[in-house]
C-alpha cells in the first residue's frame, strides 16, 4: 500500500491532491500568481507536500511568507514548456536573454525602477553580448524587452505602480512606466542550483546522472531509479518501455509506481504494451492540451489521423520501418545544439568539469534494446513506420485544401511553417519522432486513427472556425493518450 499522503484524511485527500497538481503545474506560486488563492492552498499543505514531493519525485519545495518554489530534478532537456509572450507565443532566444539580463539589472536597483531606466541598464549589458544588443529606438527590441518585463510582472516580481509598459513600447519618448520591485519573489524566480560560469555543457544542469551516484548501496540506487521512473511518467505524455534501460524498465513496470502517482496527483495511471501514461482528461495538470483549439493543433490532429491511416497499410503499400533515436541520442543531439551557442569565454575554466563525458554514455548506462523483460523474452530493436517529408507536405496540402477555411490566414499562407509547428506539437505529445527526412509514427498515434472533423460555417460575426474532433477508441496494443 502506498505511503503517500499518510497524514491526510480521506475527506481531505481531494483538496490535498489539488494542492499537489497546483504546485506541479506552477513551480512558482506567489500572492497573485497563478491566482489569489493558490498560495494559501499550497501553504496549508506545505509540510505534507515537502515530504511527499521529495519522497516520490525527488523534488524540493521551498516556502516563504510570499512564495512557494518547487525545485525540480531535471533528467532531460525539455523544449515543451517555454516562457510565453504577451501574445501567448514562446519566447525566442532574444527574449530569454533579456529576461536574464533584467533579473541581473533588478538586483542593482532599489525599491522602484522606471521602465526606461531598466531598459538602459539591460541595454548596457546586452551590447557586450555578440549578436544581442538592445536598441530602445527599435520597436522589435522594445517589444521583446517588455515581454520579459511582463513575464516578471505576471508572477509578482514587479508590480506596476504608474504608467503603461505597452505605451512605452509604442513610444518611449512620450510614455513611461514605474514598477515596485519585490525582492523575495525575485529571489524565488532566480534560484539557480548551479553556478552557470562553472558549466562547460548544458548537460551539467541535469540531475539524473549525479543523483544516481549520490545514493550509496543497492537500496539507494533503487530508490533513485524509482523517483526517476515516476518523474518520467509525470513529466511526459507517455513513458515508452523501449526508451528505458534495464533498471528503469523494472521501476516503470512496478505496481508501486501507479499507486504512488495516483494517490499523489488524483489522476489515473494506464499501462499498455508499449509504455505507461498518466491520464489527465480534465487538463488539471497538463501544460499542453491535445486535441486543442487553434490552427496548429487542428492541423496536427488531422495530420495525425492521416499518418495513423497510412500505418495501417499492408503489403507493398506498407510503410518502411526504421529504428527511433534513443532517449540518450535525442538528449545528446539537443545538448550539441545548445552547447554550440555556449559563450565559452565566460566559463571559469578552473571550476568547470575538466572532461565532459559523452552525453549519450552518461545517460545510457545499459544497452536499451538488448535486455529482457519480466517474462525473460529478449527485447529486440524497436522499429516504427516512417513517413517522408514530401509525403507529409502532400498530406498537409490536402488538409489545407479541405479545411483551410478555418485556419489562420498567416499559417494557411505559409505551409512550411504550419507543417513544422504541427510536427513539433505531435513530437511534444510523443505521437511521432522527428528524424532526418521525415517522421516516425510512435504507438500513441494509434489513438487518433478515427478522427473526424468538419469546418463550421463562418459568418461576419464569428471568429475563425474550430475543428471539433472525435477520436475513436484506441486498440488494445497502443498506449492511451495522457492529455486528450
Image: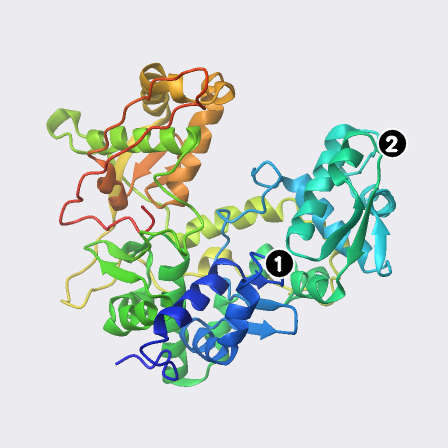
Looking at the rendered structure, the secondary structure element under dot 2 is loop
The answer to whether residue 362 of the structure is visible from this angle is no
User: Residue beneath label 1, please?
Assistant: 32
Residue at image location 37% in from the left, 75% down from the top: 12
Residue 435: % across, % down: 39, 37
Work out whether residue 79 or residue 327 is closer to the camera in this orientation and state it: 79
Residue 139: % across, % down: 76, 29
The answer to whether residue 295 of the structure is visible from this angle is yes
* Disc 1 residue crowd, few under 14, some 14–19, many 20+, Cα 10 Å: some
Work out whether residue 250 or residue 380 is closer to the camera in this orientation and state it: 250
Looking at the rendered structure, the secondary structure element under dot 1 is loop
Residue 320: % across, % down: 23, 32
Vertical relation: 264 (above or below) 480? below
Q: Quadrant of residue 266?
A: bottom left
**Taking 419 as reference, is 112 left or right?**
right
User: Residue beneath label 2, please?
Assistant: 174
Number of marks present in the image shown = 2
Mark sitting earlier along the chain (2/1): 1
Whole-number angstrom distance, CA of label 2 to CA of label 1:
30 Å
Vertical relation: 221 (above or below) 116? below
Amino acid at each position: 500500500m502506498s505511503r503517500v499522503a499518510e497524514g491526510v484524511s480521506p475527506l481531505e485527500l481531494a483538496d490535498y491532491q489539488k494542492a499537489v497538481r497546483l504546485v506541479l503545474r506552477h513551480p512558482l506560486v506567489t500572492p497573485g500568481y497563478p491566482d489569489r488563492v493558490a498560495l494559501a492552498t499550497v501553504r496549508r499543505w506545505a509540510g505534507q507536500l515537502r515530504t511527499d514531493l521529495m519522497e516520490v519525485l525527488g523534488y524540493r519545495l521551498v516556502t516563504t511568507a510570499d512564495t512557494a518554489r518547487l525545485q525540480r530534478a531535471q533528467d532531460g532537456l525539455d523544449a515543451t514548456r517555454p516562457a510565453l509572450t504577451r501574445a501567448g507565443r514562446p519566447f525566442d532566444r532574444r527574449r530569454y536573454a533579456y529576461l536574464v539580463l533584467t533579473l541581473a539589472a533588478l538586483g542593482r536597483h532599489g525599491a522602484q525602477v522606471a521602465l526606461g531606466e531598466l531598459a538602459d541598464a539591460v541595454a548596457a549589458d546586452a551590447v557586450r553580448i555578440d549578436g544581442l544588443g538592445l536598441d530602445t529606438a527599435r520597436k522589435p527590441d522594445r517589444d521583446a524587452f517588455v515581454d520579459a518585463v511582463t513575464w516578471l510582472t505576471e508572477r509578482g516580481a514587479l508590480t506596476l505602480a504608474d504608467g503603461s509598459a505597452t505605451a512605452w513600447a509604442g513610444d518611449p519618448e512620450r510614455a513611461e512606466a514605474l514598477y515596485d520591485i519585490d525582492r523575495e519573489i525575485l529571489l524565488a524566480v532566480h534560484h539557480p542550483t548551479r553556478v552557470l560560469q562553472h558549466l562547460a555543457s548544458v548537460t551539467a544542469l541535469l540531475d539524473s546522472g549525479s543523483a544516481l551516484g549520490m545514493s550509496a548501496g543497492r537500496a539507494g540506487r533503487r530508490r533513485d531509479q524509482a523517483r526517476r521512473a515516476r518523474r518520467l511518467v509525470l513529466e511526459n505524455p507517455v513513458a515508452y518501455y523501449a526508451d528505458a534501460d534495464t533498471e528503469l524498465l523494472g521501476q516503470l513496470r512496478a505496481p508501486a509506481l501507479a499507486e504512488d502517482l495516483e494517490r499523489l496527483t488524483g489522476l489515473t495511471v494506464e499501462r499498455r504494451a508499449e509504455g505507461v501514461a498518466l491520464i489527465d482528461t480534465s487538463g488539471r495538470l497538463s501544460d499542453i492540451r491535445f486535441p486543442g483549439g487553434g490552427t496548429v493543433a487542428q492541423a496536427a490532429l488531422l495530420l495525425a489521423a492521416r499518418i495513423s491511416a497510412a500505418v495501417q497499410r499492408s503489403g507493398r503499400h506498407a510503410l518502411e520501418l526504421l529504428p527511433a533515436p534513443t532517449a540518450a541520442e535525442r538528449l545528446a543531439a539537443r545538448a550539441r545544439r545548445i552547447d554550440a551557442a555556449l559563450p565559452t569565454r565566460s566559463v571559469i575554466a578552473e571550476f568547470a568539469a575538466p572532461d565532459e563525458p559523452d552525453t549519450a554514455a552518461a545517460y545510457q548506462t545499459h544497452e536499451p534494446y538488448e535486455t529482457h523483460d519480466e517474462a525473460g523474452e529478449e527485447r529486440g530493436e524497436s522499429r516504427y513506420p516512417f513517413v517522408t517529408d514530401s509525403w507529409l507536405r502532400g498530406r498537409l496540402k490536402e488538409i489545407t485544401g479541405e479545411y483551410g477555411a478555418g485556419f489562420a490566414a498567416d499559417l494557411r499562407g505559409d505551409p512550411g511553417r504550419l507543417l513544422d509547428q504541427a510536427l513539433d506539437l505531435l513530437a511534444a505529445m510523443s505521437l511521432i519522432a522527428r528524424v532526418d527526412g521525415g517522421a516516425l509514427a510512435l504507438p500513441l498515434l494509434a489513438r487518433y486513427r478515427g478522427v473526424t472533423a468538419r469546418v463550421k460555417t463562418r459568418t461576419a460575426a464569428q471568429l475563425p472556425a474550430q475543428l471539433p474532433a472525435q477520436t475513436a477508441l484506441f486498440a488494445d496494443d497502443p498506449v492511451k493518450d495522457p492529455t486528450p
